[in-house]
Amino acid sequence: MSEIAAPDYDFASLSPDDFEVFVRDLLSAQDRLVYSTFRVGADGGIDLKSVSDEGWVVAQCKHTPSADRGSVLRAARKEAGRAAGMGFVPVRYVFVTSADLTPASERETQEALSGVAGTVEVHGRGWLNAALALHPEVERRHFKLWISSTQAVRAMMQDGVFLRGESRIQRIERNYLRFVHHEACEVARFTLEQHGCVLLSGAPGAGKTTIAEYLLLLWWHRGFRVIVDPRTVDQWWTWLEDDTPTVFFFDDAWGQTHRQD
């Protein structure tokens, strides 16, 4: 099965809260530590916190995709001033921004934060994409990165992918911003990867179609052609005559919602 292409995101599709959770998951995977987020509100200079064998690790997230060199530097100086309110000195401080940094701006930002912790790291857009390439599971979990309401879903049709109507496209466009990734999504993904087939069952309103559409988007992002709801199983064979990797989606299997039916 093909892997997801190396990412090159500007992260503009994420809200500030989305970005903070994304950075939490990426740092946790990269550092092999568990980072915590905190409730929305005054954070005292701490967006994320973890503990290593050496001591506390603090991360601060600045979601400013279009920020210039001066804006990033001013934000770093402000955070350096707030660091005194943390009440402890971390052994490591990580400043993460979605802005595109140059080597010079990265160095200046790091200098502005010197003294905040024993070790200070500054990561910008380039580092985020490089780290994300090493952790595709994080990219899968945060699929708002690679799907946009005005581009990706409609590109599925333009690329020869069939969604059976404008209404389904509009529903996906509306729903993906509210989509919450949860354990059932991972179980379904793993099952489809391992067995080539997954059956989603449950009561009406349980979220079967939502998970199925998530899988469709994920497999499309991997380069698969998506065939949605062909009228009969016999018609599926039409799409197997070429060598294009294909994933099929059959919704409302003969009106049944449970396996035993």
Image: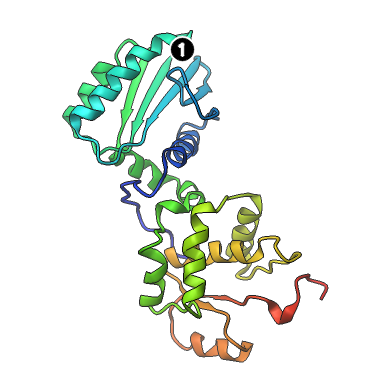
Q: Badge 1: few (under 14), some or many (20 or more) residues near its Cα, within 10 Å?
A: few
The residue tagged 1 is 86
Q: Position of residue 113 (x, y in %)?
A: 30, 17
Residue at the image position 70 percent from the left and 60 percent from the top: 206
Residue at the image position 44 percent from the left and 52 percent from the top: 144
Q: Is residue 222 above or below residue 35?
A: below
Q: Secondary structure at mark 1?
A: helix
Residue at the image position 49 percent from the left and 86 percent from the top: 239
Specify the quadrant of the image occupied by residue 5: bottom left
Q: Is residue 16 above or below residue 242?
A: above
Disc 1 residue type? Met
Specify the quadrant of the image occupied by residue 84: top left
Indicate left or right for 42 with 99 as reference: right
Indicate left or right for 102 with 32 as reference: left
Which quadrant of the rendered structure holds the C terminus? bottom right
Seen from the viewer's position, the closer of residues 73 and 40 is 40
Q: Position of residue 78 (x, y in %)?
A: 31, 18
Indicate left or right for 248 with 91 as reference: right
Q: Position of residue 75 (x, y in %)?
A: 29, 24
Q: Position of residue 61 (x, y in %)?
A: 39, 30
